[in-house]
Image (spheres, grey):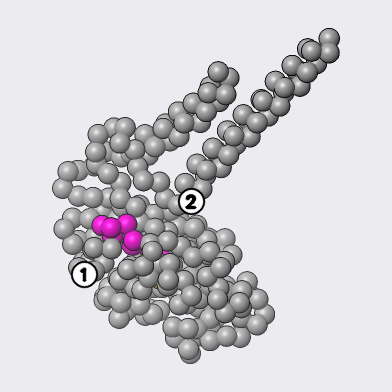
Amino acid sequence: MKKSAFLIAPALALGAVALSTSPALAADSTTYQANLGAINGSHASGTAMITLNGNQATVTEKVSGLAATFSGKPYPHVQHIHIGARGTCPGPSADTSGDGVISTTEGAPFYGGIGATLSTSGDTSPAAGTDLAAAGMGSSFTYQRTITLDAKTLASLQSGTAVVVVHGLDPATLPAGAQKEPSDLVPSLPLAATSPALCGTLTAMPAGAPGTGIAAPAQQQGADLALIATGAGLIAAAGGVYGIRRRLAAKA
Ligand SMILES: [Cu+2]
């Protein structure tokens, strides 16, 4: 009986979390959200939201904690919607070269290739992917732009495999050997300049009835698992205390 009470409490808590994150939405658009997490020890963070009407995607993004300057100027952070792979962000095992840095290419099996460039002006196609002049600038910035998605990017977004990636690391944070490596994308630039710093999967926020909950992003699922594990720990601890009390009671 006591064990079932412990199992029910975390489940209720998780339900409350799911409910509280379901927004009210207009019927004719779909909203996607991503929590942007640090890659390559960037210590950066951010959020991205896309409101989709047909193939028109209004992107609203806020990032902070990125590398601030490069050669005395605001650091250009190229950023994209990556598509067509697993729709996940790479972990340390993605560093197949073993240089201590997950390059853009090494991360591709997870987040895929460039579907759209989140440029500040002009071209938003993959061709603009390394245009530093149209990149996000500096350690913190807010980005908002309505862009047209091509069919592949639209399909990837709708199937849950679109991933926002913000590039550009402070070279000083790379292992010494990797600081001397050229970029895998633009060999005239250092590896740090184009390697991923932030990553997050765009997840649809359903416009359904309250209680339908949401598909939690991977990081949230991790937190949920931690909660469940904590619950299991409490159960084990409670069982242990109960057992000790019984043994003491038997001695008395
Ligand atoms: Cu990218």
- Residue 106 x %, y %: 48, 75
Q: Residue at 19% of width from left, 61% of height from top?
A: 56
Q: Identify residue type, mark 1.
A: Asp
**Spatial distance from mark 1 to mark 2, Cα to Cα?**
28 Å
Residue in the picture at 41% in, 32% down: 15
Depicted 21 relative to depicted 166: above or below? above
Residue 225 is situated, as x and y percent measured from the top left of the image, at: 52, 43
Residue extending furthest bottom?
Answer: 188
Does 39 lie within the magenta span? no
Which numbered circle lies on residue 63? none
Secondary structure beneath disc 2?
Answer: helix
Cβ atoms at labels 1 and 2 below 8 Å apart:
no
Q: Amino acid at mark 2?
A: Gln
Among numbered discs 1 and 2, the one appearing first in the sequence: 1
| Residue 149 horizontal/vertical position (percent) | 22, 66
The residue singled out by tag 1 in the image is 150
Q: Quadrant of residue 113?
A: bottom left
Disc number placed over residue 219 in the picture, else none: 2
Numbered disc in front, either 1 or 2: 2
Q: State left or right for residue 28 relative to residue 100.
A: left
Asked whether residue 143 appears in the rendered view, the answer is no
Q: How many marks?
A: 2
Mark 1 crowd level (few <14, some 14–19, many ≥20, 10 Å Cα):
few
Is 158 covered by the magenta stretch? Answer: yes
Q: Position of residue 137 (x, y in %)?
A: 44, 70
Q: Nearer the viewer, residue 225 or 64?
A: 225
What range is drawn magenta here?
A: 157-165
Q: Nearer the viewer, residue 248 or 73?
A: 248
Q: Is residue 234 above or below residue 75?
A: above
Res. 151 visible in picture: yes
